[in-house]
Amino acid sequence: MSRIGFIGIGNMGKPMALNLLQAGHSLKVFDLSKKAQQSLFDQGAISAMSLRDLVKEVDFVITMLPTGKEVKEIFTSPDFLSNAANNTIFIDCSTIDVESSLDAHSLAKQAGFDMLDAPVSGGTVGAKQATLTFMCGGDKKIFERCTSTLETMGKKVVYCGGPSQGQVVKICNNMVAGSIFVVTSEAFALGEKLGVDKRVIYDVISASSGNSWVLENACPLPGGKPESGKDKDFTPGFSAQLMLKDLRLSQAAAQTGGSPTPLGAAATVAFQQHVNNGHGQLDTASICLLINPEIK
C-alpha cells in the first residue's frame, strides 16, 4: 500500500480520500477547512498541520482544488515542493485551465519531481462509488506507476498524452456534455409546446439517434426521467456553476488553440444566464428551467 498526501477535502475530494483509506492506503490530509480535515481524521486519516507536514514521507501527493489559481498557489508555496521526498509523484485531479496545468508541471519538473494531471468525470456520485473516469496527462511511465492508486477511486483510467492533455480531454468532454444538456432541454420544451407528452419524447429519443449519456443518466427534467415522480429540487450531483466553470475553460482553450466552438460558446452563454438567474447551486440538469421556466 502507498503513503498518500491529499489536499482538498471538498465535495469531490472527501469521498475520493475515503476510498483511498478504505483500500488500506496510509493517508495524510490537508484542507483550509479544519472541519473538513477533522472529518477525515475521524475516519483514520493523519491530519497534516501544514503543506510542509503533508508532503513529508509520502509516495504520492494528490490535489483536488477549485481552480488553477489555487493549484498554482500550492505549487509555488515555499513549503510545498521543497519539502517533498525525492521520489514523490504529484497528481493533480483538479479541473483547471490548460495554462495553469502546464505551469504546475513545469514547477514540479524544475524541482526534480514527476507529475500527472488527472482530472475526473463522474461527479460526486462517481466519487462516492469509486466509479470516476480519470483523464491523465504526463509521462507514460509515470502514468503507469499511478494507475493502481487511481483505480482505487475510479473505474476507468485513461492515458491522454503529455502534460496537460488530461485537462484538454476533460474540457472537451464537458463542452460536449454542457451542449447536450442545453439542446436536450430545448428538445423537450419544443415537443411539449407543440403538444407532445414528455414521456413520448423521452421514449423516442432514448431509443434513437438523439440518445446520450445525459438523457439516460441526468435527463434535464424535474426529477430526471419523466417517470421518476421526484420533486423538482435539482439536488446537485454536478452543479450548474461547475458546468459553467468548465465551459469557460473550454472557451479559453478554444481561443488559445484557434479552434472555433460555436455550440460550446452558445452553451456557455446559456449556463452563464442560468447562473445569473440564481440557479448556480442547482444540478446541471436544471438548465431546463432557463429553456422553459414553466416546466413541470
Image (tube, helix red, strand yellow):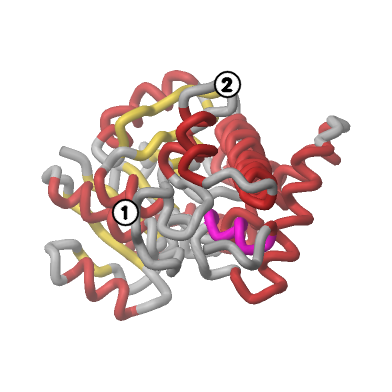
**Disc marking residue 147:** none
In the image, taking residue 151 as reference, residue 102 lies left or right, namely right
Q: Is residue 254 visible?
A: yes
> On screen, 11 above or below 109?
below
Query: At which x and y percent is residue 60?
Result: 34, 43
**Disc marking residue 5:** 1
Q: Are marks 2 and 1 in contact (CB under 8 Å)?
A: no
Residue at horizontal 66 percent and vertical 60 percent from the top: 292
Q: Secondary structure at mark 1?
A: strand
Residue 287 is inside the magenta segment: yes
Residue 235 is inside the magenta segment: no
Q: Which residues are magenta?
A: 284-290
Q: Compare marks 2 and 1 and give the one earlier in the sequence.
A: 1
Instruction: Look at the magenta stretch and give its main secondary structure.
Output: helix
- The amino acid pointed to by label 1 is Gly
Residue furthest toward the front?
195
Query: At which x and y percent is residue 118?
Result: 47, 38
**Disc marking residue 209:** 2
Q: Is residue 136 visible?
A: no
Is the residue marked by circle 1 packed among few (<14), some (14-19), or many (20+) residues within 10 Å? Answer: many
Residue at horizontal 34 percent and vertical 58 percent from the top: 229
